[in-house]
């Protein structure tokens, strides 16, 4: 039975309902407007601008343009679909219906009908199952048509299916105990439960960050220590030069997923690891070769990735993020924000019009309250925060580039940026408004200009 679940506008729940839905459509229109402006750039800039002549060949420019247009069209349609689904969830009281079904399932599994914790765990599981199923056709289309067409997809259908299943199971295994504990804390925590909630969430986050590299990431991709050789020796020397406590150095076989490339570091205190994508390395071939001879030939033909010196320059940039405490600053901002959100939740979570706006007329489940406050009440705040964080991140990227330049990597970093942009078919021309809103990393031209301007100063 499907019926509308729209509250009267005269009531508070009615006003909340209209506010939430209205804001969701307003952000949607805004995003679409920006995407439209950027699509206009793709359409009109058929020739690479003059200042790009040393950066990108016409052929790569055309490819990058075609790839961007396909991605943008995909975003246009999948975004509209998501917006319609989101609206449907509100208009038909989707959360409340799913909550009732979860109660029946929990009861069928043998839990008492009044048990909020089992019902919440089933709810979270079903919600995640539904969203995986709804997104599946889109993700299949994106991976096997869009990415495939432009030569990025390296996944086989078998790999894709296994990967999706694994992601779903791992998420459930982690979220079930966490969600149960959250509900328990809200229920028994008293007036200041939000402080315990914050403490618990922080502990879980630190725990997951600690076990992620050794227990979770290897379930999805293969990590091999970088073999002895020139690159390894030079990376170790670089780490030593700037006192980076490097303990492990891995190559991840990103090439089994896609041809996009990257490098990053992680770990706490004196226990840091660096991970390089195999696609970043020009000469890297996996140690245990299971490729057929013909595949090897194919690999040799098309040379992508960076030389040893360029990889070092990329790492110079990454280590700049560490030296300048960007990761720590990010964690602190996240924690302060989380505390703010939880304390607002602490004062709002008994306010029944919030629940009634989402068709919860009989009960006020704690976890539903958390979703409503974090996702819907905070939506305008989240948009602004996200924009500020994007600005902050762009600032950090320039700083990390500056750090690499001071290590003497200016020229090599420039080369690496150009090569990686080419390998990833990055389109180099952007509408300023689109770029200001979306780009956590400055566009390649701005980064190169900054590197060159500083190089002249030196
Ligand atoms: Zn960076």
Image (tube, rainbow, N blue to C red):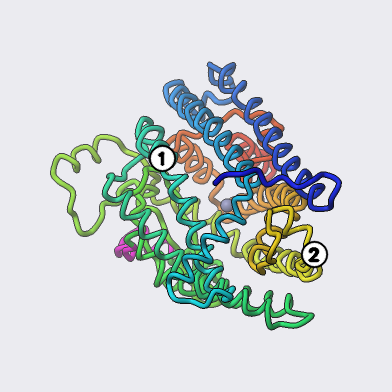
In this image, 422 relative to 100: left or right? left
Q: Residue at x 57, y 41 (%)?
A: 85
Q: Label 1: few (<14), some or many (≥20) within 10 Å?
A: few
List x then y, in percent, for residue 125. Answer: 48, 62
Looking at marks 1 and 2 on the same chain, the residue that comes earlier in the sequence is marked by 1
List x then y, in percent, for residue 46. Answer: 53, 16
Tell me where residue 228 sits by quadrant. bottom left
Q: Residue at x 52, y 46 (%)?
A: 413
List x then y, in percent, for residue 151. Answer: 35, 34
For the magenta stretch, what is the residue range?
223-235
Q: Label 2: few (<14), some or many (≥20) within 10 Å?
A: few
The label shown at residue 137 is 1
Q: Is residue 277 shown in magenta?
A: no
Q: Would you say residue 292 is visible in this rendering? A: yes
List x then y, in percent, for residue 28. Answer: 67, 37
Q: Is residue 226 shown in magenta?
A: yes
The residue nearer to you, when weighing 209 against 54, is: 209
The residue nearer to you, when weighing 45 against 352, is: 352
Badge 2 marks a residue whose secondary structure is: loop
Which residue position holds label 2?
Answer: 351
Badge 1 marks a residue whose secondary structure is: helix
The residue nearer to you, when weighing 24 against 41, is: 24
The label shown at residue 175 is none
How far is mark 1 from mark 2, CA to CA? Answer: 38 Å
Q: Residue at x 19, y 41 (%)?
A: 295
């Amino acid at each position: 039975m499907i019926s509308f679940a729209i509250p009267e506008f005269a009531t508070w729940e009615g006003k909340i309902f209209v506010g939430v839905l209205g804001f969701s459509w307003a952000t949607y229109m805004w995003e679409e407007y920006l995407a439209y402006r950027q699509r206009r750039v793709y359409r009109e800039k058929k020739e690479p601008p003059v200042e790009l002549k040393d950066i990108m060949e016409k052929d790569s420019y055309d490819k990058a343009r075609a790839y961007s247009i396909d991605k943008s069209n995909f975003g246009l349609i999948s975004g509209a679909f998501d917006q319609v689904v989101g609206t449907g969830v509100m208009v038909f009281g989707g959360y409340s219906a799913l909550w009732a079904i979860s109660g029946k399932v929990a009861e069928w599994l043998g839990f008492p009908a009044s048990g909020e914790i089992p019902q919440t765990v089933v709810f979270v599981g079903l919600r995640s199952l539904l969203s995986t199923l709804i997104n599946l056709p889109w993700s299949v289309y994106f991976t096997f048509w869009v990415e495939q067409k432009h030569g990025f997809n390296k996944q086989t259908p078998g790999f894709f299916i296994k990967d999706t299943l694994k992601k779903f199971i791992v998420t459930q295994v982690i979220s079930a105990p966490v969600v149960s504990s959250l509900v328990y804390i809200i229920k028994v925590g008293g007036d200041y439960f939000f402080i315990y909630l914050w403490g618990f969430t922080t502990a879980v986050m630190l725990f997951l960050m600690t076990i992620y590299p050794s227990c979770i990431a290897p379930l999805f991709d293969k990590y091999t220590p970088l073999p002895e050789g020139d690159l390894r020796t030079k990376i170790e020397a670089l780490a030593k030069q700037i006192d980076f406590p490097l303990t492990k150095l891995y190559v991840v076989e990103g090439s089994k997923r896609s041809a996009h490339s990257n490098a990053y570091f992680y770990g706490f205190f004196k226990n840091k690891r660096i991970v390089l994508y195999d696609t970043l390395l020009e000469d890297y071939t996996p140690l245990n070769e299971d490729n057929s001879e013909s595949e090897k030939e194919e690999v040799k033909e098309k040379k992508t990735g960076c030389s040893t010196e360029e990889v070092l320059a990329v790492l110079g940039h990454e280590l700049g993020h560490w030296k300048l405490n960007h990761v720590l600053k990010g964690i602190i901002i996240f924690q302060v924000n989380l505390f703010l959100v939880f304390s607002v939740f602490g004062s709002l979570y008994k306010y029944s019009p919030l629940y009634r706006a989402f068709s919860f007329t009989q009960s006020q489940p704690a976890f539903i309250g958390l979703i409503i406050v974090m996702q819907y009440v905070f939506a305008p705040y989240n948009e602004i925060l996200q924009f500020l964080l994007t600005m902050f991140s762009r600032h950090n990227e320039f700083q990390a580039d500056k750090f690499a330049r001071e290590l003497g990597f200016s020229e090599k970093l420039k080369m690496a940026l150009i090569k990686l942009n080419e390998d990833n078919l990055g389109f180099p021309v952007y509408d300023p408004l689109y770029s200001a809103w979306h780009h956590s990393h400055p566009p390649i031209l701005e980064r190169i200009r900054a590197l060159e301007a500083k190089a002249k100063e030196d």
